[in-house]
Image (cartoon, grey):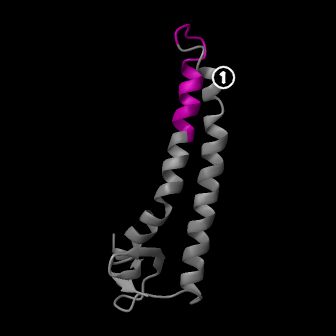
Amino acid sequence: MNRYGWMVVRAYLPALIALALAVLAMLWTSLFNHSASLNGLVPYAKWIPPFALLAALVAGLISTLRLWRWKSGKTARCRGCEGPLGRLHHGPKGDYRKCMACGGKQQV
Ligand SMILES: [Zn+2]
């Protein structure tokens, strides 16, 4: 996998983690629904999948929008590799954005 492939994987990683959390919570609630010792937690754990699925949807949409804006040239690009730049960070040497493809820091 090349650098841009890993960039896409990193971009969608929060959505994938939230999706995995939703699946695990659904499995947990279905497996332990009739267990006496964990039966008290099931009503609370049943709320995890909807929120995790919503978080996965929002994270996936944000990643898609960010990559779409980079592909159409509407966002700033890395000076070294032309990759998309991430959110603004406040560092001790000033504000910077981190390249999502190569990881380099670009001073703002
Ligand atoms: Zn770069």
Question: Where does residue 28 sit, x and y in percent of width and height?
Answer: 53, 26
Out of 90 and 66, give the one closest to the viewer: 90
Q: Is mark 1 within 8 Å of ligand 1?
A: no
How many residues crowd mark 1 within 10 Å: few (<14), some (14–19), many (20+)? few
Out of 60 and 87, give the one closest to the viewer: 87
> Please, what secondary structure does the residue beneath circle 1 have?
helix
Residue ranking furthest to the front: 92
Q: Quadrant of residue 72?
A: bottom right
Say which residue appears at 54% left-offset and 83% top-offset: 70
Question: Where does residue 31 sit, x and y in percent of width and height?
Answer: 55, 20
**Which quadrant is home to the N terminus?**
bottom left
**Which quadrant is home to the C terminus?**
bottom left
Q: Is residue 29 magenta?
A: yes
User: In this view of the protein, can residue 100 be seen by the observer?
Assistant: no
Question: Where does residue 50 sit, x and y in percent of width and height?
Answer: 67, 40
- The disc labelled 1 sits on which kind of residue? Pro
The magenta-colored residue range is 22-37
Please state if 12 lies on the left or on the right of 52 as rendered.
Answer: left
Say which residue appears at 54% left-offset and 55% top-offset: 15
Q: Which residue is mark 1?
A: 43
Say which residue appears at 38% left-offset and 85% top-offset: 106
Task: From the image, give the main secondary structure of the stretch colored magenta.
Answer: helix
